[in-house]
Amino acid sequence: MSESKEARGAAKSELGAAATQIGPLISPTAKQRVESLIQSAVDEGISARVLHARRSRVSVALACAACMVGRQT
Amino acid sequence: MVACHAVCALLAVCHERTHTPGADVLLDGRGVKVQGFPKGNFVGPTVISKVSESMRCYKEEIFGPALVCLEAETLDEAISLVNRNPYGNGTAIFTSSGVAARHFQNTIEVGQIGINTAIPVPLPFFSFTGSKASMLGDLHFYGKAGIQFFTRPKTITSNWRAPSAGAVNSKAATTMPILGKS
């Protein structure tokens, strides 16, 4: 996550500059669509973890804790 | 924007599979700001791991700089995973094994295949030979494929670079190959 944020500084403000690392998407709609798909991965991942935790007889408290930190230990 | 193929199959053959289902966004490119372009539609590099076939981010083409990672136990399982996908634009394998590469190129049901190159059809003189749901119509387009009348051609781009001394286990290059430079 941190590397992506660091890309802010690396992106040049001049289009076409050799050091440019990030190009824009074609429209706000396209951007929203990409972000919504990334969010869907987060949401579906979390629900899958809760389901898995229930199936594997892990206590509910542990399952919740796993979701809170975003990953299961 | 980094182009991402519909079948962006990363053939990570992992012997140790995690017991935890559910995706992890390892690198999140949302909210990236670029100096001088506050209203720009930017999305930074994104890596999503532990993805399964039922997830929306796998089924829909993201069309952004996002890498969706699935894992398979064996090469055959990975090939089967790719072949179950309704799309067939491009796929790639990274290996030093000629046996694995030949098996992959023969059994994969995708029209554009990269062997040790991330972008299967990197140059404009190749026809577009993506297959299955990645292609509409009877014949392929760009160049000769339009008049050859084959319905299921495969374009295979392979890169068997001789390893330099001590570089047998060097990292696979995933950058765009440029003619004469690689």
Image: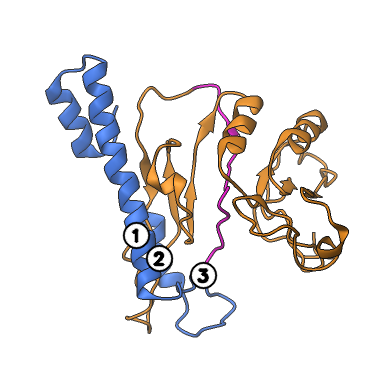
The residue to which callout 2 is attached is B43
Q: Could you say which quadrant of the image residue A67 lies in? A: top left
Question: Residue A21 got which mark?
Answer: 3
Let me know if residue B8 is in the magenta part: yes
Looking at the rendered image, the disc whose residue lies closer to the viewer, 3 or 2, is 2
Q: Which mark is residue A5?
A: none
Within 10 angstroms of label 1, few (less than 14), some, or many (20 or more) residues? some
Work out how far the residue at label 1 is from the one at label 3, CA to CA, in angstroms. 19 Å
Q: Colour of chain B?
A: orange
Q: Which residue lies under the disc numbered 1?
A: A35
Residue A44 lies left or right of residue B180; in this view the side is: left
The answer to whether mark 3 and mark 2 are in CB contact below 8 A is: no
Q: Colour of chain A?
A: blue
As for residue A56 lying within the magenta part, the answer is no
The answer to whether the residue labelled 1 contacts the one labelled 3, judged by CB atoms less than 8 Å apart, is no
The chain under label 3 reads A
Under mark 2, the amino acid is Val
Q: Is residue A52 left or right of residue B37?
A: left
Q: Looking at the image, which residue is at 55% across and 27% down?
A: B14
Give the Cα separation between the discs numbered 2 and 1.
8 Å
Name, please, the residue furthest toward the front. Answer: B138
- Tags 2 and 1 touching, CB below 8 Å: yes
Total marks in image? 3
Q: Position of residue A15 (x, y in %)?
A: 51, 84
Point 35% across, 74% down: residue: A28
Chain assignment, label 2 = B
